[in-house]
Amino acid sequence: MSSMSLPAMRIELEDEFIRLDPEPICAFIAESVVDEALGRVLAVLEHFKAAKAVRDKHGALLILDEVMAGVGRIGALRA
């Protein structure tokens, strides 16, 4: 669980969008599962909620990098 509140996360992400100039930002890319050194840690739901609020405001899409969640875990190595 994150130590930041949902409003604080939303403000931090909104500030970063503004700093980078939201006009050319088309998507927010995130991993739902972090692996390797951390030993498979699920993303914090509150982070995705905060990101959704900011993405919706700026019209950015969500791209989930699902490599760690799916490679070799669904039968075939490649689709």
Image (tube, rainbow, N blue to C red):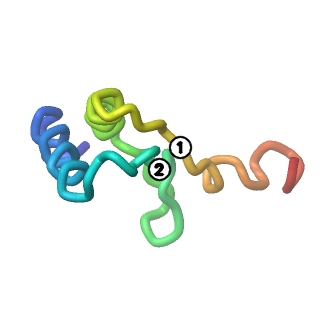
Compared to residue 7, the image places residue 24 above or below, namely: below
Residue 71 picture location, percent across and down: 73, 54
C-alpha gap between disc 1 and disc 2: 5 Å
Tell me: 49 left or right of 75. left
* Residue at position x 89%, y 50% in the image: 76
Instruction: Residue at the far front: name it.
Output: 23
Q: How many marks?
A: 2
Q: Which residue is mark 1?
A: 63
Q: Earlier in the sequence, mark 1 or mark 2?
A: 2
Residue placed most toward the observer, 53 or 3: 53
Compared to residue 42, the image places residue 61 above or below, namely: above
Q: Determine the secondary structure under disc 2.
A: strand
Disc 1 + disc 2, Cβ < 8 Å: yes
Residue type for callout 1 = Ile
Residue 27 picture location, percent across and down: 46, 45
* Residue at position x 48%, y 57% in the image: 34
Residue type for callout 2 = Ile
Q: Which residue is mark 2?
A: 29
Query: Which quarter of the image is occupied by the N terminus?
Result: top left
How crowded pointer 2 is (Cα within 10 Å; few <14, some 14-19, many 20+) is rated as few
Residue placed most toward the observer, 50 or 76: 50
Residue 7 picture location, percent across and down: 12, 33
Q: Which quadrant of the figure has residue 44? A: top left
